[in-house]
Image (cartoon, grey):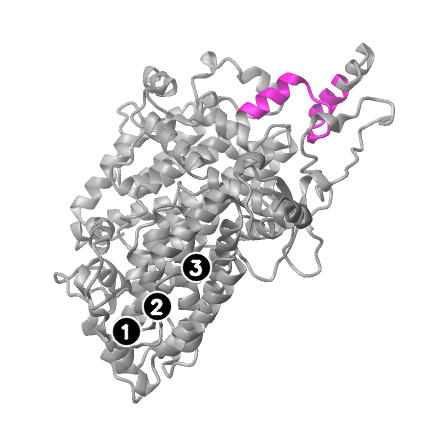
Amino acid sequence: MSLETAGDVKAEWPPYEVFVRSKRGLNHVHVGSIHAADDEMALRHARDVYTRRNEGVSIWVVPSASITASSPDEKDSFFEPSGDKIYRHPTFYDVAEDVPHM
Amino acid sequence: MTVQTEQTKQTEQQHFERTIGHEQRIEPRDWMPDGYRRTLVRQIAQHAHSEIIGMQPEGTWLASAPSLRRKAILVAKVQDEAGHGIYLYSAAETLGVDRQDLTEQLIDRRQKYSSIFNYPTLSYADVGTIGWLVDGAAICNQVPLCRSSYGPYARAMIRVCKEESFHQRQGFELLMTMMTGTDEQRAMVQESVDRWWWPSLMMFGPPDDASPNSAQSMAWGIKRHSNDELRQRFVDMSVPQAEVLGVTLPDPELAWNEERGHYDFGEPDWDELSRVIRGEGACNDERVARRTQAHEDGEWVRAAAAAYAQKQAHPVVEERTA
Amino acid sequence: MTDHENAYSGLVEADSDARWAFGTGFDDPLAGIDASVPPGIDGGRLAAYCLVLGDDSLVMAQRLIQWCTRAPELEEEVALANVALDLLGQTRLLYARAAAADPSSVPALPDGSPVPAEDRLAFFRDPAEFRCVHLVELPDTDFATAIVRLFAFAAWRLALLEALEGSVDPVLAAVAAKAVKEVHYHRDYAARWLVTLAGGTDESRRRTLDAIASTWPYLDELGRADDVSSALLPSGGSADPRAVWSSTRAVLDQVLAAAGVPEPKGAPAGNGDSAGAGPGGRDGRHTEWLEPLLAEMQELARAHPAGRW
């Protein structure tokens, strides 16, 4: 087996967005983010951090970089300098804030 | 990035101010003034660092907690603090910084954490007192932040506050239990309260007339109440709790003021606060050194997981280089 | 805090005690459970066996707690603390079972001492009275040794607990059934890390191989028949260490193969034939590391034999 040295791999783990469905019948709700080296680890970390291993809840993890987002207040976004370029991670978009007691 | 016209900038500024004026939340992709972003990054990072450094004073007692139940409660609490750090770093990351950079700024002492964690924990009663007074003061500071104008911070704070109120109850309950124990234990509780009372009052920051950034933060809705307002609220809340507990708060000037409807209290030693903030507290070096060590010792582990993930994602490339 | 009533209220149940390891009350962990010893089982032997199992989880938890504020990443702080909490919970149930099955197993303290039985067992017994295996006593020198040891421990304990789900003591069987779910997660956590570290960088692989080499000799003890288990085996109260070891062995082999790690040299035969190996942790003979670990853990509790915490 050949192994690379750490030199060409960043020790930093990328962020993942975490969505949790606390009960059957509810939507998955964005709860925050965690860092992990891969999808598998992301799921474990999300479970440890955001549900404290409460079984029976469903979790989605999505690499933050994979999210495409729009912002309701952005105007003429094709022609204006795009707001999201200055952010490294398109994260924490606004979910369910207007939905009371969801 | 294209240069924005003066007009666009003005429109955005107005939009931002209107959003804040209507008590609506600013979200990550909204335009925001640079100062607002900088202030938030500084405040959220400092808060996240405080959670992580805050694991240490109590963590000292994990190995020697005096009962299995207390040990488990303390593990759960210190674990919560790691969780709070994660929530808060992730809120900061929505502003375009990342955790690794923030951690490095903590280690290089370019960013601060709450000075309270530079005091040592000398007895097990400190675990209770930290819960009661330090977490109690933190709650007074933090509950208003659940309405912070910045959405991700406000949402992270909702989670933090819910768990924090548990910690306060747990701390108080430990002290109550110890007060029903031996004379030695009661003395331990009183001695601990004597040491932590004044530092807890200082957690609200300098008096309002000496707090340089407060006004702008209030206008931006990043901060909701003045330092002195929150301090008063904390004193009013703590005095009756101390009576229930049967301990004396170490302030001879503490007295109910009928006219104001509040307790009067003495002046904390602000010179001491500045000394601790400057890094001259009992444990500043120790706290930062421990965090640095953990970060450095963990480097090879984080690198290993990243390398492994990369190999799994690109198995063909690995074969070729083999 | 009506401010906070929003989409999150369903996620964080702040008013539920469930997320605290043991709730917030002072309840006996076995409260409400019929603690009588079933006919045909000797209470003393059952108590001794529960103590053995509780000693393993307590010392292992104490080792994991030492990682607190030292983990390689914040998410791992949370994960390691979860494992420690589970093991502490198992310890409390097992000690409570021991105390109920044979009250004489609990150290005596001065009259009127309010210290509960589980804490007398944890804090007021000397190292020679502990019966944990040497594996849990080893200090961690780096994250690789912590992971390798946790993996071996969890694989073994899971096999043991699965066997104990069939114990004729219904209390022990129930405790095992609860713990099986927890330890399943511990084994999975450690196995994934072991594979990751073995396949990560040159450095992580070297550290992992070193950790396996230094840990493996201590597995020998796990497959040995010991007096405490053997005494309870005929009545159906305990698990057969040799059978448990052979299921453990299969899991170890599987994970080492997935990690691309060759069979460690001097791997234990694990057939129970190492009778010449001398006394082990189950006989009250320990490594040099147990005594300082217990001294630190017990110091405060022992200073206040009449204390309430």
Crowdedness of circle 2 by 10 Å Cα count: few (<14), some, many (20+)? Answer: some
Disc 3 is attached to a residue of which chain? C
- N-terminal of the two: label 1 or label 3? 3
Disc 1 is attached to a residue of which chain? C
Q: In the image, residue B273 lies at what x, y percent?
A: 36, 19
Helix, strand or loop under label 1: loop
Measure the alpha-carbon separation of dots 2 and 1.
Answer: 9 Å
Residue at horizontal 41 percent and vertical 55 percent from the top: C148
Judge whether C130 appears above or below B91 on screen. Answer: below
Which residue occupies the extreme left position in the image?
Answer: C110
Q: Is residue C6 visible?
A: no
Residue at horizontal 28 percent and vertical 73 percent from the top: C274
Judge whether C115 appears above or below A90 on screen. Answer: below
Region rendered in magenta = B13-42
Helix, strand or loop under label 2: loop
What residue is shown with label 3?
C151
What residue is shown with label 2?
C268
Helix, strand or loop under label 3: helix
Residue type beneath disc 2: Pro
Residue type beneath disc 1: Ser
The image quadrant of residue B243 is top left
Badges 3 and 2, same chain: yes
Q: Main secondary structure of the magenta part?
A: helix
- Disc 2 + disc 1, Cβ < 8 Å: yes
The reply, left or right, for residue A10 in relation to residue C287 is right
Measure the alpha-carbon separation of dots 1 and 3.
Answer: 23 Å
- N-terminal of the two: label 2 or label 1? 2
Which residue occupies the extreme bottom position in the image?
Answer: C40
Taking depth in this image into account, of C73 and C243 the one nearest to the observer is C243
What residue is shown with label 1?
C274
Residue type beneath disc 3: Phe
